[in-house]
Every structure is written in C-alpha cells, then in structure tokens.
Image (cartoon, grey):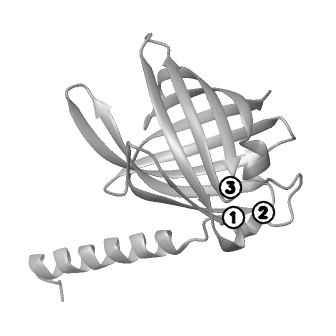
Amino acid sequence: MTPSPSRRRLLGLAFAIGTVAVLAGCASPTPADYANEKPVLSLRDYFNGRIEAHGMFQDRAGKVVKRFDVVMDCRWSGDEGVLDERFTYSDGSTQRRVWTLRALPDGRFSGTAPDVVGTAQGQQRGNVFQWNYTLRQPVGERTFDVQMDDWMYLMNERVMLNRARMSKFGVEVGEVTLTFIKR
C-alpha cells in the first residue's frame, strides 16, 4: 500500500527532524576534553599587558572577506579584567571593543562589551578557553546579532590561536581566525 502524499510529507519531515537530532547529538568537543593539555592557559596571565593579533573573517563559502590587525591592552585587578581591543581592517576602517571580564569559580568566566548582547559565558580547561556570546555586527546600514562559538588554544607562553564560528538562526554565516602574540 502506497502512503498518501500528506503521509509521505509527514514521514519526510519526521526523517529530517530525526536526522537533525542525530547530527546535533554527535559529540562536539568541550573544554573538558582539553583538561590535560599543556601548557595550561591562565587567562589572567596571558591577557595581561600588550598583545597583538592578526586575523581574517571568512564567509560561509570560505572566501576571505576581511583581514585585520588588533592591538590589545589588557589588565586585571583581582577577579576583574579589561581587554581593550583596537582593530584595524584591511579596508582602512577601525573599531574598538572593550571587554570587561569576570573570573568565576571552576575556570568559568563571564564577559561584557558594548557590542555584545547580554553576557558572554566561558570555560577554561587545560590549554583551551571556549566561550559563547551574541555579537551585534554592523553590515552596511543595518546591524545583525550573530552567535559566536569562540575557541582559543594556547600554543606556548606567547602564541594563542583563536577560531570563532559565527551563526544566525543556527546557520553558519562565517568564521574568524586569529593568532594572538603576547609581547
């Protein structure tokens, strides 16, 4: 017996939802996966003083859309840190973002910045720091809120690599790649 067209649509929808659920349930890395990696990252130590960074933004097709350099002046007082970032883009434009970070128990951190919607939440383990936040991005005359899944990997006492995936409504829209160099 052949199912009716509406039943086939319902079965197709159920199959699609099941496939998405299975794929979403696939194990994604977590900071805990890196707990034994060395060198151990201390955000307070690394993000303290002057740091330079060089990076690029790629669209979802992988095309490099913008390149940029960043100079960061960072300081901590107790459990509160300030990361003052000054961006210079390949098109000559500039931007400034000032993060205020707070160290929380168990390697957790929270952060705010003027172009971050709400509060960023992060976790540090081993040589990794991962955090999630919503970034308000200007695009032409409009602004868009994009979700950031931001991972930082300490390579040695001076170099850290950063990869951040940007998505909107769960769809990846681009990726940011940076290299931090501590001076």
**In the image, is residue 1 above or below residue 80?**
below
10 Å neighbourhood of mark 3: few (<14), some, or many (≥20)?
many
Q: Do the residues labelled 1 and 2 touch (CB within 8 Å)?
A: yes
Quarter assignment of residue 54: top right
Q: Nearer the viewer, mark 2 or mark 3?
A: 3
**In the image, is residue 23 above or below residue 41?**
below
The residue drawn where x is 45% and y is 55% is: 133
The residue drawn where x is 44% and y is 59% is: 119
Local secondary structure at mark 2? helix
Residue type at the position of mark 2: Tyr
Q: Which quarter of the figure is the C terminus placed in?
A: top right
Q: Which of marks 1 and 3 is nearer the N terminus?
A: 1
- Disc 1/disc 2 C-alpha distance (Å): 6 Å
- Position of residue 3 in the picture relative to residue 181 (left or right): left
- Looking at the image, which is closer to me, 103 or 29? 103
10 Å neighbourhood of mark 1: few (<14), some, or many (≥20)?
some
10 Å neighbourhood of mark 2: few (<14), some, or many (≥20)?
some
Quarter assignment of residue 140: top left
Local secondary structure at mark 1? helix
Horizontal and vertical percent position of residue 117: 35, 52
The residue drawn where x is 59% and y is 44% is: 82
Q: Which mark is residue 34?
A: 2
- Disc 1/disc 3 C-alpha distance (Å): 7 Å
**In the image, is residue 171 above or below residue 32?**
above
Q: Which mark is residue 111?
A: none
Q: Which mark is residue 31?
A: 1
Residue most extreme to the top? 92
The residue drawn where x is 46% and y is 29% is: 96
Q: Residue 129 carries which label?
A: 3
Residue type at the position of mark 3: Phe
Horizontal and vertical percent position of residue 102: 59, 59
